[in-house]
């Protein structure tokens, strides 16, 4: 009963948009194509499940994990906003600040797609940051919505790539980069106040 009482559509929408911008699954289509060519095939269901589990586990246990290091959510949210800011700059300016390690072999479809492309540092940071502002139930629903989008995109990668074309994918990256930049600034402003006070 309490779980249903905490569900708020505005929080679900905002959390969904934050995660959608961070995961940037449409912007990752070129990476997905490369992984598919390298490993032969990808498994949308398996990748989606692994990504979902990683995100939910971090959402639920992330605060306790931070507590072990004596870090509160507001401090992590400020640190997270800086990471999101840098990720946004990558998307807008087309530069590479975060280097991804390549993992060959059978795990190629899980790594790097499930981790760190989908459930990576940006997603984990965003989840902890969202915990500072939104109810757990609303964030869980936002994760489910995003994972459904991820599954559909993984399933239809080739068709989406042909439909959007390189120009369309580049435009999407810029648009979501600007959205992510605005989110990072808002997140920094709302949490740094608590640290100063």
Image (cartoon, rainbow, N blue to C red):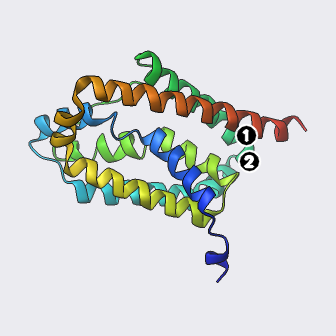
Between residue 34 and residue 165, name the one nearer to us: 165
Question: How many callouts does the rendering have?
Answer: 2
Asked if one can make out residue 30 in the rendered structure from this viewpoint, the answer is yes
Q: Residue at x 48, y 28 (%)?
A: 177
| Dot 2 crowding, Cα within 10 Å, few <14, some 14–19, many 20+ | some
Asked if one can make out residue 70 in the rendered structure from this viewpoint, the answer is no
Q: Which residue in the structure is indicated by mark 1?
A: 75
Q: Is residue 51 left or right of residue 103?
A: right
Q: Which residue in the structure is indicated by mark 2?
A: 72
Residue 67: image x %, image y %?
70, 53
Furthest residue toward right:
197
Q: Which mark is residue 14?
A: none
Label 2–label 1 contact, CB within 8 A: yes
Residue 187: image x %, image y %?
68, 38
Residue 102: image x %, image y %?
27, 31
| Dot 1 crowding, Cα within 10 Å, few <14, some 14–19, many 20+ | some
Residue 83: image x %, image y %?
57, 30
Q: Residue at x 46, y 21 (%)?
A: 92
Q: Residue at x 66, y 56 (%)?
A: 134
């Amino acid at each position: 009963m309490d779980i249903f009482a905490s569900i708020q559509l505005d929080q679900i929408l905002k959390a969904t948009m934050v995660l959608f911008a961070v995961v940037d699954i449409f912007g990752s289509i070129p990476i997905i194509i490369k992984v598919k060519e390298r490993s032969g095939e990808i498994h949308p269901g398996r990748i989606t499940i692994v990504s979902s589990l990683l995100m939910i586990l971090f959402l639920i246990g992330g605060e306790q994990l931070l507590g072990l290091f004596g870090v509160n959510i507001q401090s992590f949210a400020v640190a997270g906003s800086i990471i999101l800011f840098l990720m946004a700059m990558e998307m807008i300016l087309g530069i590479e600040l975060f280097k991804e390690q390549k993992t060959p072999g059978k795990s190629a479809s899980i790594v790097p797609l499930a981790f760190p492309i989908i459930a990576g540092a940006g997603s984990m940071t965003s989840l902890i940051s969202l915990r500072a502002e939104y109810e757990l139930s609303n964030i869980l629903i936002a994760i489910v919505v995003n994972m459904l989008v991820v599954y559909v995109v993984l399933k239809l990668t080739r068709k989406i790539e042909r439909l959007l074309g390189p120009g369309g994918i580049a435009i999407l990256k810029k648009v979501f980069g600007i959205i992510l930049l605005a989110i990072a600034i808002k997140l920094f402003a709302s949490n740094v106040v608590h640290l100063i006070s």
